[in-house]
Amino acid sequence: MNERKAPVETGRKAEVSTPRADRSAIDAFVRQARALAVSGKKEGRVILALDATMSRQPTWDLACEIQAQMFDAVGRAGTLNVQLVYYRGFGECAASRFVSDTAALKRLMSRIDCRGGRTQIGKVLSHALKENGRGKVNALIFIGDAMEENVDELAARAGELGLKGVPVFLFQEGSDPAATSAFKEIARLSRGAWFRFDQNSADTLAKLLGSIAVFATGGLTALEARGRPEDRLMIEHLNRRKP
């Protein structure tokens, strides 16, 4: 894999609103302020991995458009750094530098076209383990529609990610049964989550990407404080994975 590191942005301040006088509003404000303070102390690192084989061009274009939700969800409460990983063609699997804004990530994605080839999910999981050894990775997001590898090998790597605190969030396009079974097992072992999506659920995917970004920079506390429907859905899935 080709990997390069980019400078990390620091110094962004938490943004909070003025509380109302009633007690419940004050309590809610305090919870939110504490969550934002926690997220502002650290930077989230997320790997966004995509299957770029030929069947995936429509969803690649979709992901290119909605990835901004991750950065928008974090806002000024923390810094999100995202690395793009993709595979395509005959054994090609590459990783970008980490970027901290949506424009940079979109430029990286727009340079890549989908090409025929087999899945390389094992390489993606191994890369996430290696990258986590260099610096904490808070989440791995994978978007794909197929699985053509040894499930036991993928499960072993997913289990390692789970032990190291790197949950894998898998978004499956289509209904291939082999992919469904493998993706669910990867999510379970890594203590992440599995979701199905298609062109008609782009809005849902965008919101969930935002929830993952909030989780990556502030953990469950930040998700609970924000409290949007997609955040509650993410919390529900994450709680299911607790040992």
Image (cartoon, rainbow, N blue to C red):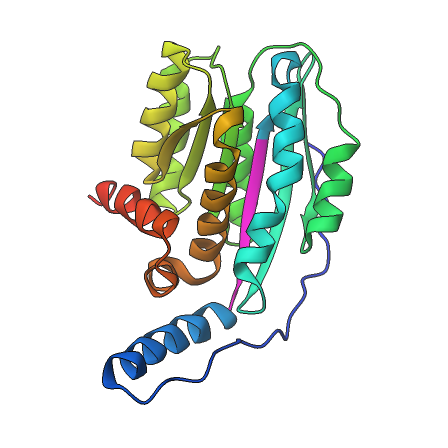
Q: Residue at x 50, y 54 (%)?
A: 136
Q: Nearer the viewer, residue 73 or 217?
A: 73
Can residue 52 be seen by looking at this rendering?
A: no
Residue 224, compared with residue 240, is above or below; it is: below
Can residue 215 be seen by looking at this rendering?
A: yes
Q: In which quadrant is the C terminus drawn?
A: top left
Report x, y in % for residue 223.
37, 58
Left or right, residue 144 beside residue 243:
right
Report x, y in % for residue 134.
57, 50
Left or right, residue 142 beside residue 103:
left
Q: In which quadrant is the N terminus drawn?
A: top right
Quadrant of residue 32 within the rendered picture: bottom left
* Residue ranking furthest to the bottom: 21
Q: Residue at x 40, y 77 (%)?
A: 33
Report x, y in % for residue 126.
51, 32
Secondary structure predominantly adopted by residues drawn in magenta: strand
Report x, y in % for residue 90.
69, 11
Q: Residue at x 22, y 41 (%)?
A: 240
Q: How many marks?
A: 0
Q: Which residues are drawn in magenta?
A: 42-49
Q: Nearer the viewer, residue 176 or 139?
A: 176
Residue 50, compared with residue 77, is above or below; it is: above
Q: Nearer the viewer, residue 176 or 229?
A: 229
Left or right, residue 175 beside residue 206:
left
Q: Nearer the viewer, residue 183 or 236?
A: 236
**Would you say residue 236 sits in the magenta stretch?**
no
Residue 239, compared with residue 31, is above or below; it is: above
Q: Residue at x 38, y 11 (%)?
A: 178
